[in-house]
Amino acid sequence: MAISSLTNIDDLDDLISESHEHPVMLFKHSTRCPVSTDADAAYREFALTIDDDSVRLSHLDLIRHRDISNAIATTLAVTHQSPQAILLRDGAAVWHASHSAITMAALRAAVASTAT
């Protein structure tokens, strides 16, 4: 499945709105951090296993777009971490993980928990 990039605040607003239709996974990545690089690899591998539209996947380069990262923390009331995966459903964060807790198994379980 394709991963969309968040590049402006409107993208975040669109994803929050879209989460009322189906789950949305946000991944915040620091290009300066080796732990984040490992989590990014797990996220991208997870994306390859998604074969339907059960979840929308998005990616944020938080070094380039710190303003969006800050908006995510404020809007979703989730303390900033890096790397960080956040699952949205109905406009709210229903799950999040950071650092080495971002694994294929954790991402699968999070998405499965929102299946309707």
Image (cartoon, rainbow, N blue to C red):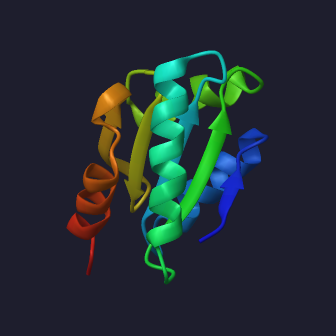
**Is residue 71 rendered to the left or right of residue 113?**
right
Instruction: Tell me the residue at 45%/36% (across/down).
Output: 39
Residue 40 position within the rendered picture, expressed as x and y whole percent measured from the top left: 53, 40
Closer-to-camera residue (18/63)? 63
Going by the image, does 43 lie left or right of 115? right
Image height of 58 relative to 30, above or below: below
Viewer-side residue, 7 vs 108:
108
Image location (x, y in percent) of residue 36 = 51, 27
**Residue 6 screen position, x and y as percent:** 71, 45
- Does residue 82 appear in this view? no
The relative height of residue 108 versus residue 55 in the rendered view (above or below) is: above
Q: In which quarter of the image is residue 72?
A: top right
Instruction: Point out the image quarter for the C terminus.
Output: bottom left
- Whether residue 10 is situated above or below residue 53 in the rendered picture: above
Instruction: Report the number of numbered marks.
Output: 0
Residue 24 appearing in the image: yes
Which of 115/12 is in front?
115
Instruction: Report the residue at 32% width, 40% height from top.
Output: 96
Left or right, 105 with reference to 18? left
- Residue at 69% in and 57% down: 4
